[in-house]
């Protein structure tokens, strides 16, 4: 209980890493945590692709930077200029989001169980989200930093091309980066306290 809460309080998104690789045992513990997540209907309808080779990681890093550019310059209601994005990324010396390991999480809708496709797709995505959170917590417990990249959805086709996934029933849910943080990790403060988000009826 105490240890879990320590991890919950300590975890934060990490986007700058040392080059130290993640060993296989740690990787597998993080993935074991993923598949321990609750899964709607017990379907375990997920697929995890570890991106480990130098070539694939560099290509994925490039794609993630492009996706972040799209996010900041085209998705926000108050968009950034390209110049602002470029100078922001330049502050990190080109290594922003460059990780020794990425895991791409796919919602696997190849074997459907439910009559209603909409509800099935939501449940499978929610199960993947639970798996991602388990990964982030397990990583934190091991002293490994991580970040959940939702912007990967903006580059789903490119991601599938990179990973050799061409089945339309495999839908990208998230990409997680994993690595040893370059600097000390301190939890990101919350803007809203419990009193702001809890209502009793
Ligand atoms: C669904 C989801 C998508 C996210 N996508 C991104 C992303 O694309 N890029 C990024 O840098 N952080 C992303 N994050 C991380 C959030 O920015 C981060 O969790 C939030 O700012 C709170 O900070 P903390 O994780 O350090 O507590 C995402 C988080 C969630 C839950």
Image (cartoon, rainbow, N blue to C red):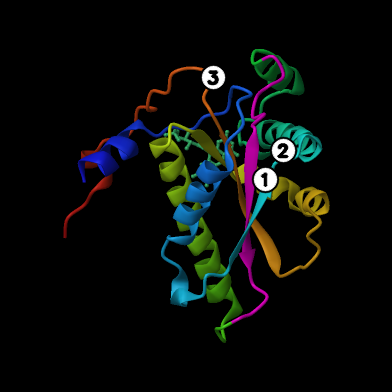
Q: Which residue is mark 2?
A: 67
User: Which corner quadrant holds the C terminus?
Assistant: bottom left
Q: Using a 10 Å C-alpha cutoff, classify the residue at mark 3 as few (fewer than 14 neighbours), some (14 to 19) or many (20 or more).
A: some
Q: Regarding mark 3 in the picture, which secondary structure is present there? A: loop
Spatial distance from mark 3 to mark 1, Cα to Cα?
A: 23 Å
Contact between labelled residues 2 and 1, with CB atoms less than 8 Å apart: yes
| Mark 3 / mark 1, whichever is N-terminal | 1
Figure quadrant of residue 77 = top right
Q: Which residue is mark 1?
A: 152
Q: Position of residue 125 (x, y in %)?
A: 55, 62
Whether the residue under disc 2 has CB within 8 Å of ligand 1: yes
Q: Nearer the viewer, mark 3 or mark 1?
A: 3
Comparing 25 with 105, the one in front is 25
Q: Position of residue 87 (x, y in %)?
A: 70, 14
Whether the residue under disc 1 has CB within 8 Å of ligand 1: yes
Q: Position of residue 104 (x, y in %)?
A: 65, 50
Which residue appears at 43% of the width and 60% of the height?
A: 37
Residue 70's label in the rendered image is: none
* Part of the protein shown in magenta: 93-112
Comparing 67 with 21, the one in front is 21
Contact between labelled residues 3 and 2, with CB atoms less than 8 Å apart: no
Q: Can residue 194 be found in the magenta stretch?
A: no
Comparing 75 with 171, the one in front is 171
Q: Regarding mark 2 in the picture, which secondary structure is present there? A: helix
Q: Which residue is mark 3?
A: 182
Contact between labelled residues 1 and 3, with CB atoms less than 8 Å apart: no
Q: Can residue 94 be found in the magenta stretch?
A: yes
Q: Residue furthest bottom?
A: 115
């Amino acid at each position: 209980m105490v240890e879990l809460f320590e991890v919950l309080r300590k975890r934060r998104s990490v986007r700058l890493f040392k080059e130290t690789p993640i060993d296989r045992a740690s990787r597998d513990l993080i993935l074991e945590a993923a598949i321990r997540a609750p899964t709607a209907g017990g379907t375990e309808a997920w697929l995890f692709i570890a991106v480990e080779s130098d070539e694939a990681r560099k290509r994925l890093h490039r794609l993630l930077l492009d996706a972040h550019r799209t996010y900041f310059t085209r998705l926000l209601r108050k968009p950034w200029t390209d110049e602002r994005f470029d100078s922001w990324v330049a502050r990190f010396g080109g290594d922003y989001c460059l990780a020794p390991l990425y895991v791409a999480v796919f919602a696997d809708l190849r074997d459907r169980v439910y009559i209603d496709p909409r509800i099935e797709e939501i449940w499978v995505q929610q199960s993947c989200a639970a798996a991602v959170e388990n990964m982030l917590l397990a990583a934190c417990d091991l002293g490994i930093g991580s970040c959940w990249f939702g912007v990967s959805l903006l580059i789903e086709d490119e991601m599938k091309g990179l990973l050799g996934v061409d089945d339309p029933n495999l839908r990208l849910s998230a990409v997680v980066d994993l690595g040893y943080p370059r600097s000390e990790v301190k939890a990101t403060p919350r803007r809203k306290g419990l009193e702001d988000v809890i209502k009793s009826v």
